[in-house]
Amino acid sequence: MSEKKIAISVEGVKKVYKLYQKPFHRVLDALGIGRHNYKQHEALKGIDFEIRQGECVGIIGTNGSGKSTILKIITGVVNPTAGKVTVNGRISALLELGAGFNMEYNGIENVYLNGTMMGFTEEEITAKMDDILSFADIGDYVYQPVKTYSSGMFVRLAFAVAINIEPEILIVDEALSVGDVFFQAKCYHKFEEFKQMGKTIVFVSHDLSSIQKYCDRVILLNKGEKLGEGLARDMIDAYKQVLVGQYQVADEENSLLDDEEIRALAAEQAGNSAQAGASVVGEHGKFDTAQKGQSAQPAATGAGQAGYNPRLLEYGTKEAEIFDYYITDDKGVRTTAIVKGTEFTIHYKVKFHVDKPAPIFTYKFKNARGTEITGTNTMYEKAFLDSVSAGEVKEVTFTQVMSLQGGEYLLSLGCTGFEGDVFQAYHRLYDVLNVTVISDKDTVGYYDMFSEITVK
C-alpha cells in the first residue's frame, strides 16, 4: 500500500502579535514613530508537524496555548510571522461560525455567499442546498433576514453550510457543541461520517472524551510551544499534568520517535487494545510514563502480580502519597477480576507529609483506549471533608456494585485538594490496575441498566 500524501505541513511556524498600550499607538507604529509603545506576544514559537491525508489529528492545550492561532494560519485567516504552511486540499473550517454572513441577507442568500467565500461554485452550492437546509432544520426562517435569527438558529445554519459542502480537509475548533442535544448528536454523526469517508480532520476541543474517541494522533501545545505528539491517551495524560503544573519534559538522551513510528503506534492502538504504561512522546525525546525522578511503582500489595501495572504514570507534589492499593470482591477476597452485578471495593492508603485542609480522594475507570468511563471522589460524595495532619495515614475505600459491561478496564487513583482557589494534585496514579469484568450477558454501551422486563 502506497504511503498517504501529506495534507497539511507546518514548518517552523511562529506568530508574534503587537500589544499596544493605547489605540492611537497603533497609528503611530504604522507611521513609523513611537516604536516602543507596544509589547510583543509570541502566540506560536516555532511549531512543526505533518498531517497525512485521511488522518484525524487532535490539538489540545490550555487557553492561550496557540490552538486557535495555528488553525487560523492553516486556513489562511492569519499570516504567520515566520515559517511555512502547505495545504493540499480544499478546506472547510468550523472556526468562527457565520463570520462571513451578511445580517441583512436571508438564510438562502447567506448560504450562497458563505459557500462562494469558501471557493465553491454556484452550481456546487445549489446541488447541496437541500442537504444544507435539511441539516440546519430551521424551517421557513431560512427565507428571513439572518438578523432576525436566534443565536442557536444562526450557528445551526452556519454549521450546516460548513459541514455539508464536503471538503477534503475539515478544520474543527470547538464547534460540535452548538445547538440543543439533538442537533449536537447530528453533528457528531456527521463527524463520524467524515472519518469513515477518509477525510482529513484537524480537531481542537477541550472535550477530551471526543479527542480520545475520534483522533488517531494528538498534538499537545502549551504557551505557544509543542510539548508533545503521540497517541491520544498519552497526550491527554500529559495534558492533565500541564493543567496542574506537573508536566516534565523527556530526558534529552532518549531517542525521538519520528512521524512514521507515531503513526504506526496510532494504527496499532486503533486495531488492538492499548497496553497500560505506553510511552509518551515529547519534542525532546521519548520517555516512559514512569517519569524521571519518580518511582515506577509505589509500594503496593500485589505489585508485580497479574493486573498490577509496573510502568504506571505517576505525578503530583508528593505532599501526600498513595500506597498499598488493591480491590476486593463481594467475599472480601483480593482480586482484579469482578463478576458483573456483584459488589466490590477499591482500597488504598494515603500518607500525608504536610498538613492539608480538606484532601479529596478519587478513583476513575478508563477503557483500554483511554476513554474515561466512570469515577467519583469524596467531594462529590460528601463523604470526607475533614483536615489531616502531617504524618497521618488515611485508609480509603470505595464500595459499589459492578455495572460495567464485560471486558478490560484500567483503574486510576488520586489524592488532590483545593488550597484557597488553587487546585493541587498531591499524588495521582494512572492505570495502576487492570480490572477484568466477568459477564455472561452484555448489553449496549458501557453499562448494564439491569432492566426488569415484562411483556404482556
Image (cartoon, grey):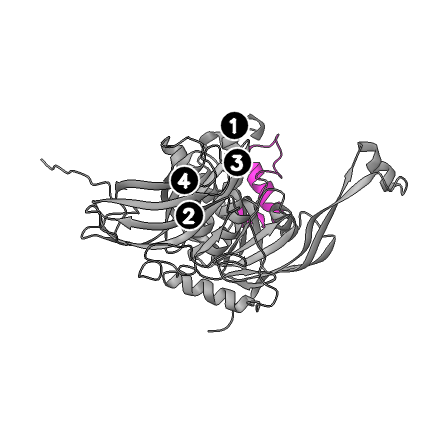
Left of 208 or right of it: where is 109?
right
Please tell me which of labels 1 and 2 falls first in the chain. Answer: 1
Residue at the outermost right position: 33
Task: Name the residue: 69% across, 53% down.
Answer: 45
Q: Disc 1 marks which residue?
A: 150
| Residue 215 can be seen in this image | no
Q: Nearer the viewer, mark 3 or mark 4?
A: 4
Task: Point out residue 156 in the picture as x, y percentages from the top left corner.
Answer: 49, 36
Kindly state the secondary structure of the residue where label 2 is placed. Answer: strand
Instruction: Categorize mark 1 by other alpha carbons within 10 Å: few (<14), some (14-19), many (20+).
Output: few
Task: Name the residue: 52% across, 37% down.
Answer: 423
Q: Disc 2 marks which residue?
A: 322
Numbered range of the magenta stretch: 97-125
Q: Disc 3 marks which residue?
A: 155
Residue at the outermost left position: 456
361 vs 149: above or below: below
Q: Nearer the viewer, residue 62 or 240?
A: 240
Q: Which circle marks residue 224 in the picture?
A: none
Please tell me which of labels 3 and 2 falls first in the chain. Answer: 3
Q: Disc 4 marks which residue?
A: 361
Please tell me which of labels 1 and 3 falls first in the chain. Answer: 1
